[in-house]
Amino acid sequence: MSAIHFRNANWREIQPWLTEYRLAVWVALLKHGPCTTMQLAQQMAGGDPVKAMKVLFTVRPRVSELVKAGVAVAVEGESSREGRYRALTQAELEARETHYQQAELLPA
């Protein structure tokens, strides 16, 4: 599924795609974001630095997938080597769905 398909998909269609670890990363971003993927891995690992490094290798790709799917966004601000991300809330996703539905009703 490409980014444009995700953008056009409504929240109910995306929800089943957010399974297991993607959902865990999205929930963690809601709780701890905006943050870097390293900060998120540390939070998900309970502060254990060794476990955080292992978790990081699965968190980074999941955050990228969530951004591509349109359920998380990069946050502007501090300039550093690593980006900061935040998850869109369910209300934001539902509002976006309504916006796209209304926009599709408008003549081109």
Image (cartoon, helix red, strand yellow):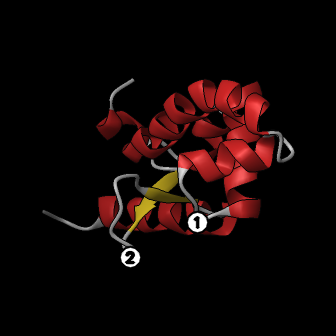
Numbered mark located on residue 107 in the image: none
Furthest-bottom residue in this view:
77
Q: Residues within 10 Å of mark 1 (few under 14, many from 20)?
A: many
Q: Residue 29 placed where, x, y %? A: 67, 54
Using the numbered discs, state the Cα–Cα distance from disc 1 to disc 2 in whole angstroms: 10 Å
Q: Write down the residue under mark 2.
A: 77
| Nearer to me, 30 or 49 | 49
- Could you say whether the residue bearing mark 1 is in a helix, strand or loop? loop
Going by the numbered disc 2, the residue's amino acid type is Gly
Q: With respect to residue 81, does 48 lie above or below?
A: above
| Residue 25 seen from this side | yes
Q: Looking at the image, which residue is at 61% across and 32% down? A: 56
Q: In this rendered view, identify the residue nearer to me: 71 or 53.
A: 53
| Quarter of the image where the N terminus is located | top left
Closer to the camera in the image, 62 or 71: 62
- Residue projecting furthest to the front: 50
The kind of residue on which mark 1 rests is Pro
Looking at marks 1 and 2 on the same chain, the residue that comes earlier in the sequence is marked by 1
Residue located beneath label 1 in the image: 34
The image quarter in which residue 78 lies: bottom left
Residue 9 is situated, as x and y percent measured from the top left of the image, at: 46, 41
Confirm whether residue 19 shows in the render: no
